[in-house]
Structure formats: structure tokens, C-alpha cells
Image: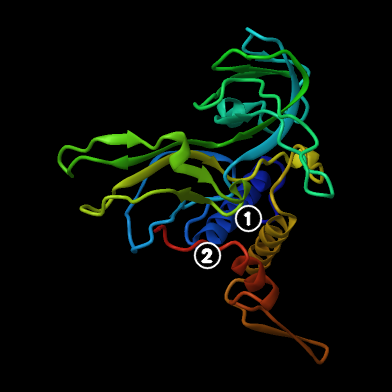
Amino acid sequence: MLDKQGTDLDLLFARLINAATDFIEAECNGRRFVLTQYVNEVSSITGSRQRYLILRQCPVFYLQFTGDTVAGSNQVTNVAATPIWGAGAGASISSIQPGMPIQWGDNGSQVNTPSYAVPQGYLVTVTSVSGTTVTMSANATQTITGANFLVHGLIAAQYKAGTPTAPSWTNFIGDQFELKDNGQSGLIRIYGTMPRNYDNSARATYWAGFVTDFDNFGNPALHTLPASLTYLCEKLVIRFVTRRKFAGKVSEGLQGATISYKDSLDADDKLILSQFRRTPSSF
């Protein structure tokens, strides 16, 4: 009941928040918003152009950071921008794209020579994070102060070379795929032609969703869940609480005024939901 205090009321609000969250995710075609790892998510190949694998969840985790490397060591020290992926589920987020990007001048000429901190041509992963130190799966090839890194949550992309009863999952080589739009779109760009003999013939393992830390709401380094989703969830919880108090009541007259309790979402609610809906997975 709503007149209970303390733990019972806390549990009630926890259930209502979970119910509102489930409703929002269902309205967004099963999209989940908290940073989560998805292992071997299988998709079918459709269409003739076969350019994109549409992941069921987005955004794929993506972060740019800087740190210091020493040739022969697998540790990156004095790392900036680690808090949002340095604890909990994000500690083993994978796929470092190392090095300093090419910079171009106003006249179109190259103004720097890229320096790569780790070996090129194969996947380097984050094996652990401790404070401002990141441990990689490979040793640095150069000693660089303030090296630039891109780390993202696309861990593996594979295609099925075997049959439904004897699948043989094969990794795409590095130049056959890449994450599009820094992971925001949840798309993997596929290069080359895929076999279309069977369904369920592509799969991916990745981290997707937003980092949540409500104690630091408003700090984009610690909390990335869009404020509009939080706002919508709060509105739904308030609406649920109000309706529990006046269960079964359609309207109420009060000194000539009438208060109505709507069953449907209002226009603002629908607009927020429309911004986060996902389409079926195919490419």
C-alpha cells in the first residue's frame, strides 16, 4: 500500500521503476539501454547487397582516450577517460584501434606522421583496467607520451561456413568489417560477398548500451543514459502511483473542474519512444 513507509515503499518504487523500464524497452522493439555484453548474437543474411549487419542493440560501446606507452610493455599508463568503462561489466571491453590519426592542413597536405603504439594488422584487446592503467593483450611497439587510442565494444564478427547441423563459425579478417558511426548506429559494415545458402549465418559478440551512474547524473564521463529516457521513466512511475491511488477511476469532478486519467501515452512520450526504436536485424 502507498501509506507504508521505509523498505516496503522503497520496494514498491523499485518494482514500478522496473515495470516502466520493461515497458519502454518493449515499446522500443526489445532494445535494452544498460551497458550489456551480447555473446554470439545470430542474424540472417538478407538482400542482394549485403553491406551492413544490423545489431539488435545500440549504441555499441566506443571511447577515445590517451595514455603513455613504453616499447615492450603491455601497459598503457596515465590514461584519461577511463571511468565510464573501468569498472563492472565494462572492464574487459575489447578491440583497441591504436595510434595517432593523420592530421590534414587547410590546403589538404598531411601535417603529421602517424605513430602507432601497438602492432598493426590484428586485434589488440583490453585485458584489464586498474585506476588509470590499461593492460593490453599485446606489447607496445613504441614509447609514446599521450598516445591516442580508440576502444570499442565490438569483440567478434563471424560468418557460418558450415551447415545448420555442423556449423563452422569463421572470424572475419580485420579488413572485411568495421564498426560504423563510432558504434552509435549499431551497424557493422561488411566488405565482400557473403554466402546465402542458409539462414542464421552471421553472428557478433559485442557490448552495447549506456553507462549508468545515477549518483553522478549529469556527468557525461560517468553517466551516458539519455535524460529523455530517465524523464519518460519518471513520468510513467508517477502515473502508475497515481493510478494505484485511484484504481478504476476514469474522471473526477472537483468544484466544476474535471480531472481525467489517461490510459494512453501522450504526444511527448510517443516522440521520445520513436527516437529509440530499433528495426529488425538484417543486412
Q: Element type at marker 1?
A: loop
Contact flag, marks 1 and 2 (Cβ < 8 Å)? no
Which residue lies most toward the left here?
165
Residue at 54% x, 60% y: name it. 23
Say left or right for 60 vs 144.
left
Viewer-nearest of labels 1 and 2? 2
Q: Element type at marker 2?
A: helix
Say left or right for 163 vs 61.
left
**Residue 88 or residue 123, whichever sits in front:** 123
Q: Look at label 2 and name its amino acid.
A: Glu
Residue position marked by numbered label 2 in the rendering: 27
Q: Quadrant of residue 164?
A: top left
Residue position marked by numbered label 1 in the rendering: 1
The dot on residue 278 is: none
Q: Look at label 1 and name its amino acid.
A: Met
Find residue 16 and report its horizontal and vertical position in percent. Answer: 60, 54
Task: Check disc 1: other Cα within 10 Å, few if <14, some if 14-19, many if 20+.
Answer: few
Image vertical order of residue 82 relative to residue 144, above or below: below
Find residue 20 and report its horizontal and vertical position in percent. Answer: 59, 58
